Image (spheres, rainbow, N blue to C red):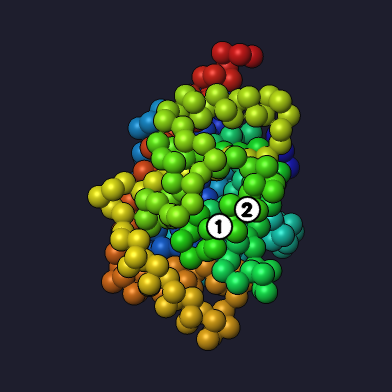
C-alpha cells in the first residue's frame, strides 16, 4: 500500500475483482456548485458510473489523508465544509503535512489517480490558457499535468472562459492528443462546438481504449484529452455564451481577480448572468461524461487484461 493513500471499501473491492475504476475530482463538489446540488450531482454521477459497469472513485484529501473513493458521510461533509483548500499539484504536500482538507482539481486528481493506478478520469472541463495570458502568464496546471501524467481525461472540452486556441497550442507543444468523441470540433464546455478542431475524431470507446493502450505501451508518457460534447438538448447558444463570458471577464479584470480565484468567480458570474441555466448545463455535461468515461474504462480494462 502506498503511504498517505486510503481506499474506500467499494474501490478496494473493485480492485480485487479486476473491475474498471473511474476517478472523479472533488473541486466540483466543494468549489464548483452550491449545496445541496453539489452532493446530489456527485452521487448521481457515481451511480451513472456504477450503471456503466465501473467503480466510481471520487478523490479528495481529508484530514491530511488521500481518499480514493468517498463514503456518503465524507461526500456530505465535503459538500458543506467551508475550509477546504482547492488543491493542485503545488498544494498536495502542504495539505498532507498540515493534516488539512483539500478538494482536488483536474491536475491533482490526475496525480492521485495515477498513484492509485486508475487510468480514466471524468470531469466537467479542463483548465487551460487564460485570456490575456501573454501578459499575465495565467496558465492552468492542468495542462502541465496532461503532459506528464498517464491518465485519460474525459471532459466537455476546455472551459469556455479560456483562450481555447492557445490552450490547444500548448497541448500540441506538450504532445497531448486531443480526441473528439463523435465530433471533429472541440466542444467548449457549455456549447457543443468551438471555432477549433480536435486532433482526431473517434467514434467508439473501443477506438479510444486502443489508442490509450498503444500510447502507454510505447512509453509515451502523458495524458489524453477525450472531448465529449454536451448533449444537444442541454447545450447553450454559442453567441449568447460568448457575450456573457465577455461580461464576466471584464468584471474579473475590474476587480483584479486572478490566479486560482479566477475560475470559480467567472463560473459563478456566468451562472448568475444566465439565470442559473449554466449550472443545469454543467450538471448535464458531467453526467454525460460519466457515461462515456465508464464505458471507456471498462473497454480499456478488458483490453489491458486480454493482452497481459
Gap in angstroms between the C-alphas marked 1 and 2: 6 Å
Give the side of residue 301 with respect to residue 72, left or right.
Answer: right
The residue that appears at 67% across and 29% down in the rendered structure is 216
The residue that appears at 62% across and 53% down in the rendered structure is 169
Q: Which residue is mark 2?
A: 169
Give the side of residue 54 with respect to residue 271, left or right.
Answer: right
Question: Helix, strand, or loop for circle 1?
Answer: helix
Where's the N terminus, which quadrant?
top right
Across and down, in percent, residue 199 comes to 54, 40
Tell me whether the residue at label 1 lies in contact with that at label 2, contact meaning CB atoms closer than 8 angstroms.
yes
Instruction: Place residue 63 in its image quadrant.
Output: bottom right
Question: Is residue 132 shown above or below 110?
Answer: below
Across and down, in percent, residue 233 comes to 25, 50
Across and down, in percent, residue 305 comes to 57, 17
Instruction: State the residue in front, 89 or 245.
Output: 245
Question: Disc number at residue 165?
Answer: 1
Instruction: State the residue in front, 42 or 268.
Output: 268
Question: Is residue 175 shown above or below 141?
Answer: above
Instruction: State the residue in front, 195 or 157.
Output: 195
Amino acid at each position: 500500500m502506498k503511504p498517505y493513500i486510503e481506499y474506500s471499501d467499494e474501490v478496494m473491492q473493485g480492485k480485487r475483482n479486476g473491475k474498471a475504476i473511474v476517478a472523479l475530482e472533488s473541486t466540483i463538489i466543494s468549489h464548483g456548485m452550491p449545496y445541496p446540488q453539489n452532493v446530489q450531482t456527485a452521487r448521481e454521477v457515481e451511480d451513472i458510473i456504477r450503471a456503466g459497469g465501473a467503480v466510481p472513485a471520487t478523490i479528495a484529501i481529508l484530514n491530511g489523508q488521500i481518499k480514493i473513493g468517498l463514503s456518503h458521510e465524507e461526500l456530505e461533509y465535503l459538500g458543506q465544509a467551508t475550509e477546504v483548500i482547492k488543491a493542485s499539484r503545488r498544494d498536495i504536500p502542504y495539505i498532507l503535512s498540515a493534516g488539512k482538507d483539500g478538494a482536488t482539481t483536474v491536475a491533482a486528481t490526475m496525480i492521485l489517480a495515477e498513484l492509485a493506478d486508475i487510468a480514466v478520469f471524468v470531469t466537467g472541463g479542463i483548465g487551460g490558457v487564460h485570456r490575456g495570458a501573454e501578459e499575465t502568464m495565467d496558465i492552468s496546471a492542468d495542462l502541465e499535468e496532461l503532459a506528464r501524467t498517464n491518465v485519460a481525461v474525459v471532459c466537455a472540452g476546455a472551459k469556455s472562459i479560456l483562450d481555447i486556441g492557445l490552450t490547444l497550442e500548448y497541448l500540441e507543444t506538450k504532445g497531448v492528443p486531443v480526441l473528439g468523441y463523435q465530433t471533429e470540433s472541440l466542444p467548449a464546455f457549455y456549447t457543443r462546438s468551438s471555432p477549433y478542431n480536435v486532433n482526431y475524431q473517434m467514434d467508439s470507446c473501443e477506438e479510444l481504449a486502443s489508442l490509450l493502450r498503444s500510447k502507454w505501451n510505447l512509453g509515451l508518457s502523458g495524458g489524453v484529452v477525450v472531448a465529449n460534447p454536451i448533449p444537444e438538448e442541454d447545450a447553450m447558444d454559442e453567441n449568447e455564451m460568448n457575450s456573457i463570458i465577455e461580461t464576466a471577464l471584464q468584471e474579473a479584470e475590474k476587480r483584479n481577480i486572478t490566479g486560482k480565484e479566477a475560475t470559480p468567480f467567472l463560473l459563478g458570474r456566468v451562472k448568475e448572468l444566465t439565470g442559473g441555466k449554466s449550472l443545469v448545463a454543467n450538471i448535464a455535461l458531467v453526467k454525460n461524461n460519466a457515461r462515456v468515461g465508464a464505458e471507456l474504462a471498462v473497454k480499456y480494462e478488458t483490453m489491458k487484461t486480454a493482452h497481459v
